[in-house]
Image (spheres, rainbow, N blue to C red):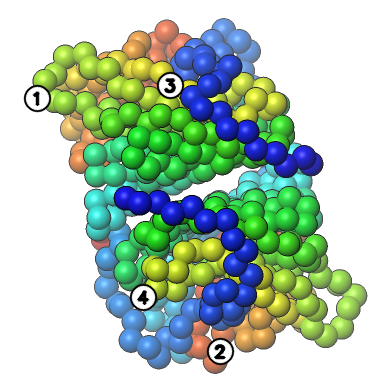
């Protein structure tokens, strides 16, 4: 796809009135399922200490699968244990490779900033804004890459390029977003090596229900249980860090079956 | 505020080079057990889209509002307007006076993926980075001192009147930048200026599926909106000429 920029200083041919842009009611309207949502899922996670189940946060997500196979995930959390609040919108292609992401972070020191990331082919462009000003970033994007935005709902998507027949650890690249409490550091990312291992299929029960999952080792220290079709995170355990992320509420719909 | 714009490759520049999952500090570190100080208060709810006459369902919208310690507000919303085969995902942050600071929008309509982008306001300039089927665009346009950004999900419609001066009253013009969410996908989601007129009609008690609320009733152009509270939560919206209404349901607020 051609990547080009034009400056459009207050000039547009689309100057129609907002309210007039909406077609009159007389026009026939769809009464069935939305053709732009093939299926959807939404839920809530509880972050807690693994040992004593002390509550640390909640996270909510909503995912739409679109007719072109791409998926949009909206995630926002209240990580009160760390006084963080992250909001993320991530869209990936049908094979789960990232297309774009928007994120906005608050840390214990207040507003850290936002970042808008676009991945086109082998190029990643990011534009952040925050207390330190505006920054842009242009990086090479390896084929086997994912974006680490920190909410857990999309962490299963880091495994999209796995070889299901491979044994042992598999390697790729993570565009990991800076999310520390140092707000002088903008929420841009760094390409870092990422490793995961497929451990096999397991049926997992959480407060949200029972799910057929694939178990992975992620990033060396975490065990994660992920659904197959949409790679939704069901549970994450990090024993050494005494952390657990648990899906506690879940709803989904399949418009194709309506 | 002086804004520095740098284009730089930051590969391996930060010292934060460890995996996302490993970034969470160990819980042995003393952690907060009370409310998050970055969320002073919050609201979340659903908005039903339906026709006024027949009450035919047209779609729904979920939203969450967070008010931050610096008095800015973030609104996160996603909708499913199946009547128009439209999907809108928007995150917007506004100042304590409801002036937009930044918005992310992503739209799908009858033609498929319409586009996405981030709109950032600094002083009297709004700049946008936009992606869509036609490629990547940037837009730079004038942002008045008092204005609203029309991103189309209903939850924002109470905020458009955030600059209305109730001491003056009467019909007031609200400058707006309107994002094109509806035309064919080949048209990028640019923002263009338009005006709205707002008039406070009075304080009214309104009953909707979410409950009964004391609201401010405004006449806006040729439709009516009812909004409540300091955070201007949309309670009800009626547009008789188009036979449409939007009603608040499943409302929750906190801290709790």
Residue identified by numbered label 1 = B167
Secondary structure state at the residue bearing disc 3: strand
**Circle nearer the N terminus (2, 4):** 4
Q: Which residue is pictured at 83% across the width and 85% down the height?
A: A168
Q: Which residue is pictured at 57% across the width and 7% down the height?
A: A26
Q: Chain of mark 2?
A: A
Residue identified by numbered label 3 = B193
The mark total stands at: 4
**Residue in the foreground of this view, choosing between B242 and A98:** A98
Residue identified by numbered label 2 = A239
Q: Chain of mark 1?
A: B
To the question of a shared chain for discs 4 and 3, the answer is no
Can I make out residue A255 in this image? no
Residue identified by numbered label 4 = A81
Q: How far apart, in angstroms, are the residues tagged by discs 3 and 1?
A: 26 Å
Q: Which residue is pictured at 63% across the width and 33% down the height?
A: A6
Q: Residue B114, which numbered label?
A: none
**Residue in the foreground of this view, choosing between B213 and A100:** A100
């Amino acid at each position: 796809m051609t990547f080009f920029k034009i400056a459009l200083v207050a000039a547009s041919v689309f100057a129609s009135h907002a309210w007039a842009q909406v077609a009159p009611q007389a026009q026939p309207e769809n009464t069935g399922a939305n053709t732009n949502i093939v299926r959807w899922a939404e839920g809530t996670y509880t972050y807690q200490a693994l040992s004593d189940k002390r509550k640390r946060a909640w996270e909510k997500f909503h995912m739409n699968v679109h007719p072109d196979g791409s998926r949009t995930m909206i995630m926002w959390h209240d990580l009160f244990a760390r006084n963080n609040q992250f909001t993320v919108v991530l869209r990936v292609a049908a094979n789960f490779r990232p297309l774009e992401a928007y994120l906005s972070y608050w840390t214990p020191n207040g507003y850290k900033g936002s970042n808008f990331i676009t991945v086109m082919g082998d190029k990643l462009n990011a534009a952040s804004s925050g207390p330190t000003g505006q920054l842009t970033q242009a990086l090479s994007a390896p084929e086997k890459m994912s974006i680490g935005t920190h909410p857990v709902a999309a962490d299963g998507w880091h495994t999209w390029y796995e070889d299901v027949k491979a044994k042992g650890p598999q390697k790729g690249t993570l565009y990991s977003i800076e999310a520390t409490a140092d707000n002088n550091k903008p929420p841009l990312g760094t390409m870092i090596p990422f490793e995961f291992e497929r451990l096999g299929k397991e049926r997992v029960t959480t407060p949200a229900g029972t799910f057929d999952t694939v178990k992975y080792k992620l990033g060396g220290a975490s065990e994660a249980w992920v659904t197959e079709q949409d790679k939704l995170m069901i549970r994450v355990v990090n024993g050494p860090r005494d952390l657990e992320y648990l899906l506690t509420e879940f709803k989904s719909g399949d418009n194709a079956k309506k | 505020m002086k804004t520095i714009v740098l284009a730089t490759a930051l590969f391996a520049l930060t010292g934060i080079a460890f995996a996302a999952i490993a970034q969470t500090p160990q819980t042995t570190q003393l952690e907060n057990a009370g409310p998050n100080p970055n969320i002073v208060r919050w609201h979340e709810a659903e908005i039903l889209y339906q026709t006024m006459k027949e009450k035919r369902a047209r779609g729904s919208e979920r939203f969450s509002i967070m008010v931050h310690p610096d008095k800015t507000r973030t609104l996160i919303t996603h909708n499913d307007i199946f009547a128009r085969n439209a999907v809108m995902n928007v995150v917007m942050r506004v100042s304590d006076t409801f002036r937009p600071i930044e918005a992310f929008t992503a739209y799908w309509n009858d033609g498929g993926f319409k586009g996405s982008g981030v709109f950032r306001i600094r002083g009297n300039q709004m700049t946008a980075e936009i992606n869509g089927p036609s490629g990547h665009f940037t837009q730079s346009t004038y942002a008045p001192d008092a204005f609203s950004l029309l991103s189309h999900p209903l939850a924002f419609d109470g905020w458009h009147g955030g600059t209305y001066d109730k001491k003056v009253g009467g019909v007031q013009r609200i400058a707006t930048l309107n994002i094109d969410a509806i035309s064919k996908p080949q048209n990028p989601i640019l923002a263009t200026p338009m005006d709205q007129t707002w008039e406070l009609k009075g304080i009214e008690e309104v009953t909707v599926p979410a409950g009964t609320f004391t609201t401010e009733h405004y006449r806006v152009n040729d439709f009516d909106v009812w909004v409540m509270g300091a955070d201007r939560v949309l309670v009800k919206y009626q547009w008789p000429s188009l036979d449409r209404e939007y009603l608040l349901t499943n409302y929750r607020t906190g801290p709790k």
